[in-house]
Image (cartoon, grey):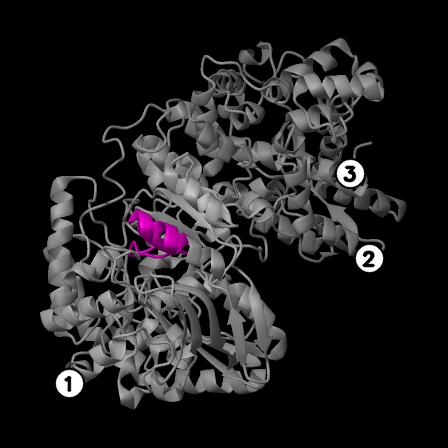
Amino acid sequence: MTDLEAELRTAVRGDVSFGVTSRALVTMDASNYRRVPLGVVAPRDADDVAAVLEVCRSNGVPVVARGGGTSIAGQATGIGVVLDFTRYMNRLVELDPATRTAVVQPGLVLDRLQDAAAPHGLRFGPDPSTHSRCTLGGMIGNNSCGSHSVAWGTTADSVRELAVVTARGERLRLGQEWAGAPEGLRELVEGDLARLRTGFPELPRRISGYALDALLPEKGADVARSFCGSEGTLGILTEAVVGLVESPRARALAVLGYPDEGAAAEAAAGLLSHRPLTVEGMAVDLVPSAVALPRGGAWLFVETGGDTAAEARARAETIVRAADVVDAVVVTDPAGQRALWRIREDASGTATRMPDGSEAWPGWEDCAVPPARLGAYLRDFRGLLTEHGLRGTPYGHFGDGCIHVRIDFDLLTDAGVGRFRRFSEELAELVVAHGGSLSGEHGDGQARAELLPRMYGPELVGLFERAKAVWDPDDLLNPGMLVRPAPLDSNLRFSVLPRRPVDVAFGYPLDGGDFSAAVRRCVGVAKCRTTSVSGSAVMCPSFRATGAEEHSTRGRARLLHEMLAGELVTDGWRSEEVRDALDLCLSCKGCRSDCPVGVDMATYKAEFLHHHYEGRRRPAAHHSMGRLPVWLRAVARTRTARLVNALAAVPPLAWLGKRLGGIAPERGIPRVAPETFSRWWGRRGRAVGDGPRGRVVLWPDTFTEHLSPEVGRAAVRVLKAAGIGTVLPPTLRTAPEGFHPLAARRGRVCCGLTYVSTGQLDRARTVLRHTLDLMAPVLETDLPVVVLEPSCAAALRTDLPELLHDDERAGRLAARVLTFAEALERLAPDWRPPRVDRPAVGQTHCHQHAVLGDAAERRLREAAGLTGELAGGCCGLAGNFGFEKGHFEVSRACAEEQLLPAVRDATDGTIVLADGFSCRTQLDQLAGVRGRHLAEVLAEGLVEGLDRGGAAGVS
């Protein structure tokens, strides 16, 4: 333990950590920069903050305040001690509806304040796209804005008072009329009034530099306002009084289509007279093709409010009539509005990949110009990009003249970094020429502070330096930001990564086979740190269960980044820090779809485990559950299912088996079916090998085959009723007539899921190659392959071609895979399922959500009269995860988030749907409820229909 660490542990009540993991998690924010700190402290209160500052000042160690770590200019990174306010100082202290104010701690996430204010018809005005994870302290530090700034301004407009501790331990209460001003600040300002009155451009999104003009007498000498946007360089915020605004009771969203980005930009300023709540702009290259938007090549999202839905719609329609548009639509449905806003909010991640898949980065993320000049500025900006051979996709707050853009800088080579610098210098000149601000929302940080003299001139920047010295004479707080800045091309986070591709097992097709590029996908927007999920979202269940950064997708990606860098995490693939962080990853694959940049931590985890345990002893669970198909086939072969079930029912034997197998003692051992699905199909199912609408190959996955054969039997019945025949993959025992002679090969097909999830990738490849050999006859036909277990279907769709990227058969089989509902929709589009007409609850399988999609399932449920939405999140069992020793509490916490409450709140007669075996097992073991696959529900409906004289199924 270092002397500094020991002193801090003695001085503070909060958490002090100088360990590798804690430091690695905060080396980066959402910017291009990386700085390695000495340690991390999570203070419990203002006294802790003061104590940290005293210890660090006596040791000459810098201090950096950090909230959600979503800053895009590098200001939330540091080389000294990082203060993490999200762990303890995250409370809403008070909310007063009468005065429309709230007292908040700096680590409070914005959405938690919004949730508390909403029942009173109030809200905090600014709302960055990171509202679900950014903190109020970070927003004050950056003077954040968001999409509603045209109506409610910046964070500074909502700040009333700030409680601050200075670097020398002075506790100040900042407000108007010089309230809380440190000694010397008033004299500094009053000695240079002329420069302060003329040196700042007038525009709504001027965030760059210190807001010293807020200290002018005619502006109320507002010390709290001037502190906003200081990026933790003047003092440490410990509490804030913020103002709230009345939230419109109803909203409408007018989506206006324009021919191109320039036309949308030029139109934005003209809409402000109608007093909209937002005027956001996006071009076609950031919008998924499937999104239903009005015609056009660019769009403005203009939100209006009112006391009633009719009033909000009328205001939106007025704007449509006033706008010269190609096409327009007004959306009043809240769900439809949320879907459209998600596109805008995800843009900060979506924009990190160009249409051809190449990488794009922040750095010039949020320049702002006067709104009336936005069109002209964008034309010049595009021209400058072309001149430097760069590409970018502007989007953002068109109504405020603030543009976000990620640019395909090459930050990996010296030549590329040189071009990054030249472009930055020329763009700064361009922004200033248009009367703009280098930062319009995210602050200057390291990305732009070096260029502030081009915007303000050397004299005003010199005044900034003197102001910093008044507040922080020892330069203790976040040095290198805003004044005396580090060069904009130093401390780049990519410089430490290996230049040659790392030898890996998966193909990483979207990253050119480069694992470093896959890890670079995480740019730190931290959507995985959202503390609650909405709709069908999944990511990141382990973070929501623990609240710990190392259990977020971003945290794990940061550790992998540091592992590749080798500076902080020095053990490479053998790293215990990375292993421990990945241990609570459920491999739910939620990040694959919910992360705006498509980080796939389940694949990264499998890759890591493969290397980590190479040539080493593996955990018992990897053998007991990773090789589950082997053990279950042995039981089937020896016909000992009843004996195994009987032994598992004896508590001492079950305890011993779970202990030897690394299984959580809280778990029950699932029963093995006495008759496998394939054996049943051999006896009864061959009769449905043909059908008037063709036939499908029904995949006998391990779970359906050995643990839930009733699901397979139900699927056969429903497919037959729809006129679809079923055959099983060719094996020695069940080869259907007419298949290729390879049908006589021994073995069973397997998706390899259990091997992949435990990182046994060599074994997975062997199993999958054998499966491709067995499926060769099928691949010579055009038969689709129907997989009932969502996790197995997802493994065949993605893991198979990514793991066997050198075998063209893998892609062909992956393209054949259909879910049960997809097969019915594709092969029998005019078939109508039996009407069940009952409410349904349950949870969309996380792999289904992330990889397969559930649109066909939704339509099938609707056609069957199954009403209600299924929950999002993850059931928490997630294959082997919830069975492994040490995971039970997290597994249960994940289930308690959405699934179990939904089931408990269900009314009598509600059907509990769970297409995944893990989900059904979790429901059974934690709630005593039997979940059913959709195929089972429809098969029961067929039987009921038969009783009423309907069509028959297969008995």
Element on which disc 2 rests: loop
Magenta stretch: residue 54 in it? Answer: yes
| Residue sitting at the far bottom | 218
For the record, the magenta segment spans 52-78
> Within 10 angstroms of label 1, few (less than 14), some, or many (20 or more) residues?
few
Element on which disc 3 rests: helix
- Marks 3 and 2, the one that precedes in the sequence: 2
Give the residue drawn at x 38%, y 80%. Answer: 179
- Marks 1 and 3, the one that precedes in the sequence: 1
> Within 10 angstroms of label 3, few (less than 14), some, or many (20 or more) residues?
some
Of the residues shown, which amino acid type is indicated by label 2? Thr
The numbered mark at residue 517 is: none
Measured as percent of width and height from the top left, residue 184 is found at 25, 75
Give the residue drawn at x 55%, y 31%. Answer: 783
The numbered mark at residue 907 is: 2
Marks 1 and 3, how far apart in space? 74 Å
Magenta stretch: residue 876 in it? Answer: no
Circles 1 and 3: CB distance less than 8 Å? no
